[in-house]
Image (cartoon, rainbow, N blue to C red):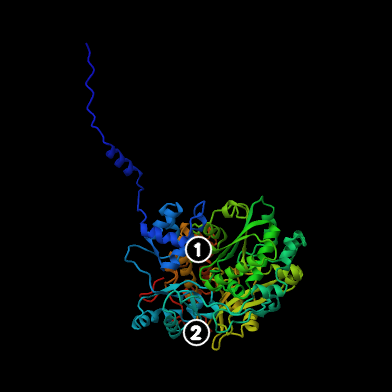
Amino acid sequence: MHLAPEAPTVAAVSVNDMRERIRRKSRLKGRQPEEAAMAEVAQLLGPRPANGFRRDLLIEYLHRLNDHFGVLHDRHLVALAKQMNLPMAEVYEVASFYHHFEIVRGDDAVAARLVLRVCDSLSCSMAGARELLEVLPARLQAAGQGDVQVLAVPCVGRCEQAPVAVVHQCPVPHATVDTVMEAVDSKPNRALALHPQAPAAINFDVAALAGQSVPAQSEAISPAHTDLATYRAHGGYQTAAALVNSEMDAEAVLSAMENSGLRGLGGAGFPAGRKWRIVRDQPAPRLMAVNIDEGEPGTFKDRTYLERDPHRFLEGVLIAAQVVGTEAVYIYLRDEYHGCRVLLQRALDDLRAEPPCPLPHIELRRGAGAYICGEESAMIESIEGKRGEPRMRPPYIAQVGLFGQPTLEHNFETLYWVRDIVERGPQWFASFGRHGRKGLRSFSVSGRVKHPGVKLAPAGITVQELIDEYCGGMLDGHQLYAYLPGGASGGILPASLNQIPLDFDTLQPYGCFIGSAAVIVLSQHDRARDAALNVMRFFEHESCGQCTPCRVGTAKAATLMQAPQWDEELLDDLAQVMADASICGLGQAAPNPIRCIHKYFPHEVGEGPWPGDLPKPRNSPLTEQLPQGVQP
């Protein structure tokens, strides 16, 4: 008879053991939010919406934390991830991407009392930024203000006031060591170091300035501006209201935009009317994204117009939204423009309080210090609360853009001209121009000229005409040696090519482009190779890192460009790879300065004899190495 084996003895499990096992399995992995941190974050975020906190507002929430505490504490990032029901890694990777967020660890970490930012981009470096960076840390320490953090930062969009320092959010134009120290003394904490408010209203008629310089502001940081009452008293919003109320034909407005020849003024130059028609033909819902992330070194035109008349821009937004049929508008403003942000938010609030017509949904979004977000798809990623990394195309954002919807993307200045083009007629805008070109261009001019600033000049004007007629000539003791026609990415040209019409499509045969029309003027006291190295270091700092040719190529190029004699073959190979294989315009345009130095300034890098009519090299004011103790 076969007997079954005896069953093994099973130990009894108590109820408490079972409960503990369930508790262990239900416990979240990774760092858990602290109760105090959760309370601090909840207070700053406000009441939880019924559907939870919006994922696309992550960067806005990070700004609230950063503004309040001066830094981003890791404990608050954990709490924010919990509040938003996001993985901690996702919150961290976004926060760590943007330059204006500083993540600190540990309960003992504290923010600097103030952060003093000194612009070290080309125009400010030419004006003496290096000396500021060398002297200020020691002066602050000697004055008992060693808790002020000094940072070297890329362009802050005030190149006509070079050199520029920023005490927390308050700019110090034409900065000297003494004026910066005075600003720090008078603004001892972040609550006091805010951008001054703009004074009383004026009527700013930009069309009346066609063919002139935009008047420079007074010593005050914030110029007088046009408020809603003043704008409406001079006919403002009548065109937008007529269009929204079906008193004006949308097709007629669209035709006017096409016939004016207006092209995108952010740098790409795509015909504005054609873009409207492309997006209009896409299936609804459609959205609009406005790019005011004016980060190209040498560019400050958008800031100049915005801080004088925000409503002319907003009327352009309303007209475009109505013609194209967009349901919502997202305005992306660079974080360095603190005064503009307050002004634009107030203008939006006033417009909503007294709407001239039904308004679309409009949101103002704040950048966080990333030049790459000036690229349209990177900006859209940032508006969605993500890292500002460019998208692969196709599909193009006109088809699949913001939140996956067809999107009309425009630069600020493009929309700024819409009202005048519609009201004055397309031929008014097209009637301007020189040397066979048509239209108006807002040139941001800085460098070795007597009167830098925004010059509203005819398209096709030459740099020599621009300097002589609009800038009062070169500074005393300076002669034109070279110029950058389109900011950091637009290349560098010699004085011998000072008669090229400045416009879209005219500079490409010379290896350059006009971009955002940022003209930086160099004299015989400067070296083009130093300017090229300065902008390459800018590209290295601002590369998003997504693609290897750009991430590694800009860093390698900056290293090679420091050599007294350049390795022409190696740099040319590197430039070719960067231009061919980079995902977006940053890496594709970064080689332009290298190629221009090889082509037009070989004598500066040991590739040709030094011209007899040029002075020999000397110590350049452009910084090649940051002073000791200064953080980039």
First in sequence, mark 2 or 1: give its number.
1
**Which numbered tag is attached to residue 615?**
2
> Which residue is outermost to the bottom?
476
**Which numbered tag is attached to residue 575?**
1
Element type where label 2 sits in the image:
loop
Name which residue type carries label 2: Pro
* 28 relative position to 158: left or right: left
Q: Position of residue 181 (x, y in %)?
A: 42, 83
Rounded to the nearest whole Å, what is the CA distance between mark 2 and mark 1? 29 Å
Residue 505 appears in view: no
**To which quarter of the image does residue 228 belong?**
bottom right
* 507 relative position to 179: left or right: right
Task: Give the residue at x 35% y 81%.
Answer: 138
Q: Nearer the viewer, residue 115 or 554?
A: 115
Q: Position of residue 41 (x, y in %)?
A: 42, 60
Residue 548 appears in view: yes
Q: Nearer the viewer, residue 427 or 356?
A: 356
